[in-house]
Image (cartoon, rainbow, N blue to C red):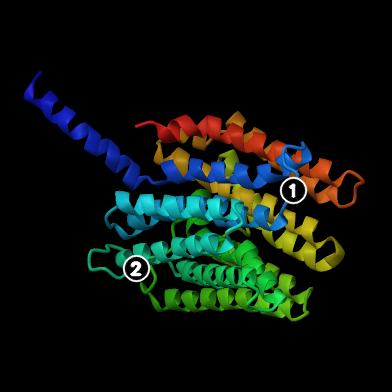
């Protein structure tokens, strides 16, 4: 063996490890799918008689605190070091993030809400230290865009919501506080993240120039103030809803999100580049305000209407953005500009699942509808994982 071959063999394991650290989405996207199967599969198990009990709280919190957070963590741990030109996430940090998400899910399954909510809050604390060291450190080559002001506001929603949910378990706060906590977690966190991250990822996906750095001009500071105002308005909308303004709260959120994504993210126009996943993300941006408006207009049908937000908005956007990140980072440009059958199958499955969930409350077979919705949704996400999983896990 030549000296060159010996050097290559010696550094190959380190290079493989650095690939995982510089591209942490390889771990967290598949992990998020597994969490989603736990949260959605809860209904499938009950409908098929495998489980004798069900919990709407369990379903909702696992979906938002584990599934969606795993996708958000995978994106942020990949995007922030690249944006700021700083070192990749450490192996210890990756283990800590994964452990916090697993404990969040395990605590919810065991009914140990205090443990689950502490672990969930820990995810935001880990993200905070990870981001701060890259945004304000001397080694940072760039700064985040103005839209990223929404990220700490999203963390505020999550931490306050986790505290209220945990306190409700000990009956140390009024019952209504638990409902407010669920609103902050299930809607507030990812409405803020969608607007904040959308300000960066939507222009990149549509083929327009990325946003400038915060502080690069007075205009960017004014943008940051506008985003901070939007995040504050989203937070206040939940307070208003809690105090009886059930129609005004969701309507205010819908307006803020539509403006934030439409103007701030450029979603007022369809994407200018080919690729079916780009069109799906564009569709998901408008499903979010649509679901909020529907829940405000038909308060008696509020929960089914909100699944337009959850399935058609949050879920579809998570998989669409994850598809873009995976295909572009893994240098699969042909698939990124095409129409992979697995992505089309996933979208069709999500559409069918949304239809079944939306019509469940108006049917005489409520739980059968939920069973079909969960089973088909799992099938669609499995098609996505079969398509991209091997590519994500290869060296």
Picture quarter with the N terminus: top left
The front one of 342 and 265 is 342
Q: Which one is nearer the viewer's eye here, 164 or 77? A: 164
> What residue is disc 1 on?
53
In this rendering, position of residue 370 left or right of residue 96: right
In the rendered view, would you say 393 is above or below 247? above
Q: Residue furthest left?
A: 3
Earlier in the chain: of badge 1 and badge 2, it is 1
Up-down relation of residue 329 to residue 67 (above or below): above
Query: What percent of the width, then of the height, locates residue 363?
Result: 90, 47
**Number of marks in the image?**
2
According to the picture, the residue beneath numbered tag 2 turns out to be: 132
- State if disc 2 and disc 1 touch (CB < 8 Å): no
Please report the residue visible at 45 percent of the width from the left and 70 percent of the height from the top: 146
Q: Nearer the viewer, residue 136 or 267?
A: 136
Residue 194, position in %: x, y?
56, 60
């Amino acid at each position: 063996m030549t000296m060159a071959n010996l050097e290559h063999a010696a550094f190959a394991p380190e290079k493989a490890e650095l690939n995982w650290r510089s591209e942490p989405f390889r771990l967290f996207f598949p992990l998020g799918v597994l969490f989603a199967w736990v949260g959605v599969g809860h209904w499938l198990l009950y409908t098929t008689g495998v489980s004798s009990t069900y919990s709407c709280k369990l379903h909702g919190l696992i979906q938002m605190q584990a599934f969606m957070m795993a996708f958000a963590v995978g994106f942020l741990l990949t995007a922030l070091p690249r944006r700021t030109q700083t070192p990749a996430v450490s192996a210890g940090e990756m283990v800590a993030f994964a452990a916090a998400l697993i404990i969040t899910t395990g605590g919810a399954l065991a009914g140990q809400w205090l443990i689950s909510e502490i672990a969930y809050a820990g995810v935001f604390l880990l993200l905070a230290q990870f981001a701060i060291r890259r945004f304000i450190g001397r080694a940072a080559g760039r700064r985040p865009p103005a839209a990223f002001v929404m990220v700490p506001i999203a963390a505020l929603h999550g931490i306050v919501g986790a505290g209220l949910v945990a306190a409700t378990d000990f009956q140390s706060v009024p019952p209504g506080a638990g409902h407010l906590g669920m609103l902050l977690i299930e809607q507030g966190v990812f409405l803020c993240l969608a607007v904040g991250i959308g300000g960066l990822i939507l222009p990149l996906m549509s083929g327009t120039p990325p946003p400038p750095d915060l502080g690069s001009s007075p205009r960017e500071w004014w943008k940051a103030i506008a985003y901070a105002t939007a995040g504050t308005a989203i937070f206040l909308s939940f307070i208003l809803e809690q105090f009886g303004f059930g129609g005004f709260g969701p309507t205010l959120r819908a307006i803020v999100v539509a403006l934030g994504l439409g103007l701030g993210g450029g979603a007022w126009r369809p994407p200018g580049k080919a690729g079916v996943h780009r069109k799906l993300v564009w569709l998901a941006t408008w499903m979010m305000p649509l679901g909020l408006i529907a829940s405000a207009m038909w308060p008696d049908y509020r929960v089914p209407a909100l699944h337009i937000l959850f399935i058609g908005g949050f879920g579809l956007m998570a998989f669409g953005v994850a598809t873009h990140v995976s295909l572009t980072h893994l240098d699969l440009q042909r698939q990124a500009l095409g129409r992979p059958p697995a992505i089309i199958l996933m979208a069709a499955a999500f559409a069918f699942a949304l239809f079944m969930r939306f019509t469940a409350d108006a049917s005489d077979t409520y739980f059968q509808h939920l069973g079909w919705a969960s089973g088909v949704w799992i099938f669609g996400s499995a098609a996505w994982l079969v398509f991209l999983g091997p590519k994500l896990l290869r060296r």
